[in-house]
Image: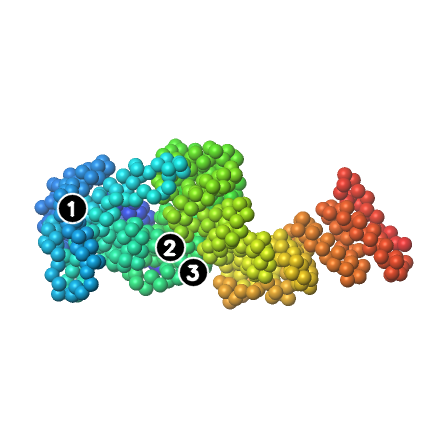
């Protein structure tokens, strides 16, 4: 994707208009997003030619005020300018009720909202025979004649007044009375008023042609808080059609999408422009997608906005979801060097540094956030992660609580505080933290997984399984999720289902390792490194079911991981699912993965247990040569040496009693020092 000079000029003008109009309506986050994007567009080369200078200046006309193209609206805005300036000043001073009362006194709101509640009650008691020709209620005539800008500012102030009072009425975070049941008491007032306003402006076709999209956005946001999600989505989509540069409206749509199928279904209903392109990328990342098409789309946008902090954050999160922590850390480091005072999304950066166990960088990040603004939720989360890395879990909980005191919708703080309570063995507090995280965002697989872990500690496996399945549904190509499902099923004695889940875990791990960072080439298991623990677990489940041949096959695969690589016939037994996103790609491409599994794991406790099982299986089948070889290999491993020595003696005695042993039979004498095999001396009888 590339834009010519005229298209770039139009994009600049649209972003300038968005900054002004969002600022006029006190949508500060949306204005900041548009302003950052505006300044990320590279400036053209300066020219001293008069004609070119005049052309350039015409393309950079300062948009100090964004005039309204609707003449009636413009006339009302001009008439209300003095009151509007007062209301905006009060809003900036966080005097929300006083701001709302400038244009909408409580008496006016009561005269409009109360009759609508009465009418809705009477309709619910009636037989529902109202026709399209029924006259509108008398309260419709009482609507104040205000410009849409002033009306939005007043109702938005009323909405924020309710949010502020809700936070004030809430108890201390995770306190004994903190049930999370406080609600915004102004939602009903704002929604009833907007319902009356839209009904009053309907044409015969049911559309309002003179609307600007801002009140639709507010109505959709209020309906989403009231859990009326389908209707909220309708009004939000309508808003982005009328004014697509309001990023806050796109974020509200994202919050209503919980699955990739929902995103694919709603995309045709959205306007097709560059902001819709960004919305698709952002929402896909919120749904933990990381395929090659997404990376290509992001690269195209970065060609237009090379220094955009928003797009650079998306690029870092793309690598993070693909489990490429090194690339994600480098991208966040570059972002921090370009915007050293920007705290947005640094909580994700701290999570990456925590997983990488990079204590010096995390300490630097914590000091930086504390110096910029120690009372931002992101700063508190970063500092909490730093204390968690130091194993100071009580101190970490303190900072996560501080982040939630500043913003109770801070998802990272709820989830991470649940992790800390797990470390502190406070399972009840951990469950409550995870539940509150799920209430904030149903797409947070970490909270679902944490709930599963906590209930598993409490040995409530049915509950744990349900939560693990929710996490696996959100992250279907994360082997850790499916391994948890399989282990839980094993504890419930559902071995057949557990085997299927663990095989899915093997496929999920190969999706990241055999293909590229975004899964190309993940359809093949040949040459892929697999987790010996999972293979041993699958083999053990087959053994408990009495299926020794299958158990033997997986034990051999487990031992094979010491040197790396899986045979084609063995990989076919794992591929029980055909929905791999890279199934149709070329098997021969390495794709830039982590070595394609060419390096083995070496000797591990899992491979030693598998080798011991194979040795005992060979004894049961009277394959004494194989049993002798495996037992001697166990002596070299130094993991289960005593059992291996006893097995060698048993093999030798059986071989002698069976008359198998001859002059060519090889024996091993093993010299030990400090309990480990240090030397082998081969001798023949």
Q: Quadrant of the C terminus?
A: bottom right
Please give the residue where the numbered disc 3 appears in the rendered image: 293
Secondary structure beneath disc 2? helix
The residue singled out by tag 1 in the image is: 109
Question: 373 or 474, which lies in front?
Answer: 474
Could you tell me which residue is drawn at 52 percent across and 43 percent down? 356
Foreground mark, 3 or 2, reads: 2
- Near mark 1 (Cα within 10 A), the count class, few <14, some 14-19 or many ≥20, is some
- Circle 2 sits on which residue? 283
**Left or right of 247: which side holds 131?**
left
Of callouts 2 and 1, which one flags the residue occurring earlier in the amino acid sequence?
A: 1
Which is in the foreground here, disc 2 or disc 1?
Answer: 1
Q: Residues within 10 Å of mark 2 (few under 14, many from 20)?
A: many
Q: Is residue 649 visible?
A: yes
Q: How crowded is the residue under tag 3: few (<14 C-alpha within 10 Å), some, or many (20+)?
A: few
Vertical placement of residue 626 versus 78, above or below: below
Secondary structure, mark 1, is helix
Q: Nearer the viewer, residue 221 or 365?
A: 221
Q: Position of residue 9 (x, y in %)?
A: 26, 54
SS for dot 3 = helix
Q: Is residue 105 above or below residue 666?
A: above
Q: CA distance from mark 2 to mark 1?
A: 37 Å
Instruction: Give the spatial CA distance, label 3 vs label 2.
Output: 14 Å
Q: Position of residue 304 (x, y in %)?
A: 34, 54
């Amino acid at each position: 994707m590339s834009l010519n000079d005229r298209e770039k000029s139009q994009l600049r003008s649209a972003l300038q208009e968005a900054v002004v109009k969002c600022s006029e309506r006190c949508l500060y986050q949306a204005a900041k997003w548009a302003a950052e994007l505006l300044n990320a567009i590279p400036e053209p080369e300066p020219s001293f030619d008069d004609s070119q200078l005049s052309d350039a200046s015409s393309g950079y006309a300062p948009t100090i005020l964004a005039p309204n193209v609707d003449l009636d609206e413009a006339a009302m805005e001009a008439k209300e300018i003095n009151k509007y300036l007062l209301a905006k000043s009060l809003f900036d001073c966080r005097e929300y009720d006083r701001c709302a009362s400038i244009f909408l006194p409580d008496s006016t709101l009561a005269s409009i909202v109360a009759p609508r509640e009465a009418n809705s009650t009477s309709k619910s008691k009636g037989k529902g025979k109202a026709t399209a020709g029924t006259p509108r209620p008398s309260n419709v005539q009482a609507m104040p004649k205000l410009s849409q800008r002033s009306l939005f500012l007043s109702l938005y102030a009323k909405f924020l007044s309710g949010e502020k009072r809700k936070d004030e009425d809430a108890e201390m975070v995770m306190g004994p009375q903190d049930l999370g049941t406080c609600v915004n008491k102004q939602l009903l007032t704002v929604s009833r008023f907007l319902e009356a306003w839209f009904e009053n402006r309907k044409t015969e076709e049911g559309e309002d042609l003179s609307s600007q999209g801002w009140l639709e956005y507010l109505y959709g946001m209020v309906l989403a808080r009231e859990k009326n999600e389908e209707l909220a989505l309708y009004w939000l989509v309508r808003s982005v059609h009328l004014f697509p540069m309001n990023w806050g409206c796109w974020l509200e749509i994202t919050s209503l999408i919980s699955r990739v199928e929902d995103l694919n279904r709603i995309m045709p209903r959205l306007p097709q422009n560059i902001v819709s392109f960004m919305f698709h990328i952002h929402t896909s990342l919120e749904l933990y997608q990381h395929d090659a098409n997404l990376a290509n789309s992001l690269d195209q946008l970065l060609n237009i906005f090379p220094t955009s902090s928003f797009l650079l954050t998306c690029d870092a999160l793309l690598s993070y979801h693909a489990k490429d922590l090194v690339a994600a850390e480098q991208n966040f480091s570059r972002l921090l060097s370009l915007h050293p005072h920007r705290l947005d999304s640094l909580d994700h950066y701290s999570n990456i540094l925590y997983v990488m166990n990079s204590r010096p960088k995390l300490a630097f990040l914590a000091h930086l956030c504390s110096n910029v603004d120690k009372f931002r939720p992101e700063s508190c989360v970063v500092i909490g992660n730093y204390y968690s890395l130091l194993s100071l879990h009580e101190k970490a909980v303190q900072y996560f609580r501080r982040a939630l005191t500043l913003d109770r919708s801070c998802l990272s703080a709820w989830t991470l505080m649940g992790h800390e309570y797990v470390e502190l063995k406070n399972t009840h507090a951990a469950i409550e933290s995870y539940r509150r995280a799920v209430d904030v965002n149903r797409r947070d697989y970490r909270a679902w997984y944490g709930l599963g872990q906590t209930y598993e500690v409490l040995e409530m496996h049915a509950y744990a399984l349900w939560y693990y399945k929710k996490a696996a549904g959100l992250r279907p190509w994360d082997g850790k999720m499916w391994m948890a499902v399989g282990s839980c099923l094993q504890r419930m004695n559902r071995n057949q289902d557990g085997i299927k889940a663990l095989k899915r875990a093997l496929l999920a791990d190969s999706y990241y390792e055999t293909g590229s960072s975004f899964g190309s080439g993940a359809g093949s298991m040949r040459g892929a490194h697999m987790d010996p623990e999972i293979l041993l677990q699958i083999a053990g489940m087959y053994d408990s079911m009495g299926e020794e041949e299958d158990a033997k096959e997986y034990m051999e695969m487990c031992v094979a991981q010491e040197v790396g690589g899986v045979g084609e016939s063995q990989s076919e037994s794992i591929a029980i699912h055909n929905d791999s996103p890279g199934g149709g790609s070329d098997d021969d491409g390495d794709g830039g993965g982590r070595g394609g599994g060419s390096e083995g794991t070496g000797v591990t406790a899992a491979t030693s247990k598998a080798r011991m099982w194979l040795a005992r299986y060979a004894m049961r089948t009277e394959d004494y040569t194989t049993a002798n070889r495996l037992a001697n290999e166990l002596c070299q491993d130094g993991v289960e040496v005593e059992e291996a020595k006893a097995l060698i003696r048993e093999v030798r005695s059986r071989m002698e009693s069976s008359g198998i042993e001859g002059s060519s039979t090889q024996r091993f004498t093993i010299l030990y020092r400090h309990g480990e095999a240090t030397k082998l001396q081969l001798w023949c009888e």
